[in-house]
Image: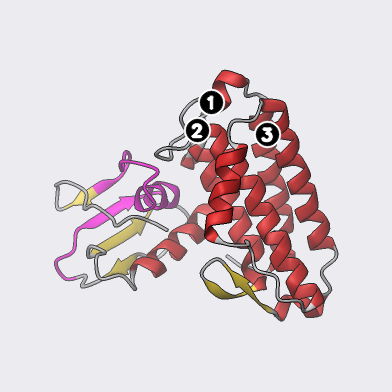
Amino acid sequence: MTTDPLLLTGEVADSAARLLDTAAGLDAAAVAAPSLLPGWTRGHVLTHLARNADGFVNLLTSARTGEDIPMYESAAARDADIAAGAGRPPAELLADLRHSTDRFTEALAAMPTSAWSAIVQARRGPWPVALVLWARWRELEVHHVDLATGYRPADWPAAFAPHLLHEVVGGLAERPDAPALVLRPTDGNRPELVLGDAQDAPQVTGTSAALAAWLIGRSSGDGLTVTPDGALPTPPEWI
């Protein structure tokens, strides 16, 4: 799957619309309830998604104007903004998410073709701005699951899960704490993915969505099979 920003715009817009529909159905008790993320309520997740959109607007603006604009003022400021906004009433959370989504859409529309080759200052350092669309799509889809409102990895768009799986496996390949694995996606005749030494590694089979969800800690591995028969290995914590 491509990460070409011009080809992902529609996917990101569709994911944002689904998320906004979910957020619109949450009352005060629901936004105060725990999410799937330890220590975070649904209000934390929704606030994070709004501030994440603003952070990506900063990166797009930096690429367009040539100004040195970081994604966030600082890690501490990012965390403080999320904590401060998490307890707001549902209507305020929803309005914030809608307005930040609109700002992101406007920033995308303002990008000239030449600006997509820029390198910007993301949270973890210099980053190609062309990855912003994929990163926003990933945030929307994964955190929609984290809201724990019935949206599951199995509901991820068909094009999303395989790309997430490849990204996660690529990241794990650079980590010494990752277990040796042979991953066998069952959807779309996709090739197996190997982590570490394949010779004695367990083979884990399932859909791309099920494999990716397990590797990023959004699933216990339900629906996956292991060969030889046994317990699933424990993946390291994802970003």
238 versus 5 height, above or below = above
Cα separation, mark 3 vs mark 2, equals 12 Å
Q: Nearer the viewer, residue 48 or 78?
A: 78
Residue tagged 3: 93
Find the distance from the CA under tag 1 to the CA under tag 3: 11 Å
Callout 2, which amino acid?
A: Thr
Measured in 3D between alpha carbons, the distance from the residue under mark 1 to the one under mark 2, in whole angstroms, is: 6 Å
Q: Position of residue 181 (x, y in %)?
A: 25, 62
Residue 32: which numbered mark, if any?
1
With respect to residue 107, does 85 lie above or below? Answer: above
Residue range of the region highlighted in magenta in the rendering? 199-225
Which residue is at the front of the view, 153 or 54? 54
Residue ID for mark 2: 41
Q: Nearer the viewer, residue 131 or 66?
A: 66
The N terminus, quarter of image: bottom right
Left or right for 24, reference 239: right
Disc 1 marks which amino acid?
Answer: Ala
| Residue at disc 2, secondary structure | loop
Q: Residues within 10 Å of mark 3 (few under 14, many from 20)?
A: many
Horizontal side of residue 97 vs 151, given as left or right: right
Q: Where is residue 238 shown, x and y percent of the image?
A: 38, 56
Cβ–Cβ under 8 Å for marks 1 and 2 = yes
Q: Position of residue 73 (x, y in %)?
A: 63, 62
Name the quadrant containing residue 15: top right
Q: Is 105 situated left or right of 192 in this image?
A: right
